[in-house]
Image (spheres, rainbow, N blue to C red):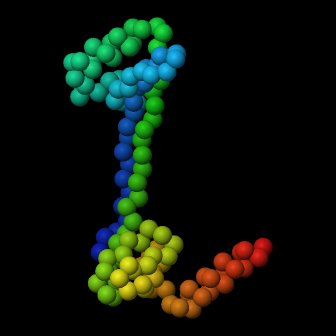
Amino acid sequence: MEIIREETHEFTEEYRIEFSYPDGGGFVFDCDKFGNILDTITSEQAQVYEKCKSNPEMKMEILDHSRSYTHPAVGKCCCNQEVALGGFTNSCCKCGREYNSFGQLLSRDDRNQREENIHEERRI
Ligand SMILES: [Zn+2]
């Protein structure tokens, strides 16, 4: 199998500052990890933010919404179909061939061996 795209990792850093009323509800603003409001805020949002900040009843909390993603490698099957290699076993949706996460074609023996191992594990 030809690997046509390598696996990539992506990390998005995002923080939000949340002001909540004691009985629920409130406001959320995008901020940096120190709680500083981002300068993409509109003037209306800035006014609400200032009101929240000066309201002693509101509880303030900085929340980490950062996320990381893995985009699996993609290989091209013998039948020309692209196969994402994100799993332990990856099947071609067109011809049914199976590949491991490195894009190596799994033989029927590999599959039988794996099924035996699964049965072994169930017995334990
Ligand atoms: Zn295929």
Task: Inspect this view and state whether residue 49 appears.
Answer: yes
Q: What residue is at 33 percent from the left and 12 percent from the top?
A: 50
Task: Inspect this view and state whether residue 35 appears.
Answer: no
Q: What residue is at 38 percent from the left and 79 percent from the top?
A: 93
Query: Where on the picture, by quarter, is residue 79?
Result: bottom left
Q: How many marks?
A: 0
Q: Quadrant of the N terminus?
A: bottom left
Residue 19 position in % (x across, y down): 43, 20
Residue 103 position in % (x across, y down): 42, 79
In the displayed structure image, the side of residue 81 where residue 70 appears, left or right: right
Q: What residue is at 38 percent from the left and 14 percent from the top?
A: 52
The foreground one among 4 and 58 is 58
Q: Quadrant of the C terminus?
A: bottom right
In the displayed structure image, the side of residue 38 where residue 14 appears, left or right: right
Residue 52 lies, with reference to residue 35, above or below; the image says above
Residue projecting furthest to the left: 43
Residue 45 position in % (x across, y down): 27, 20
Q: What residue is at 41 percent from the left and 58 percent from the top?
A: 70
The foreground one among 18 and 26 is 26
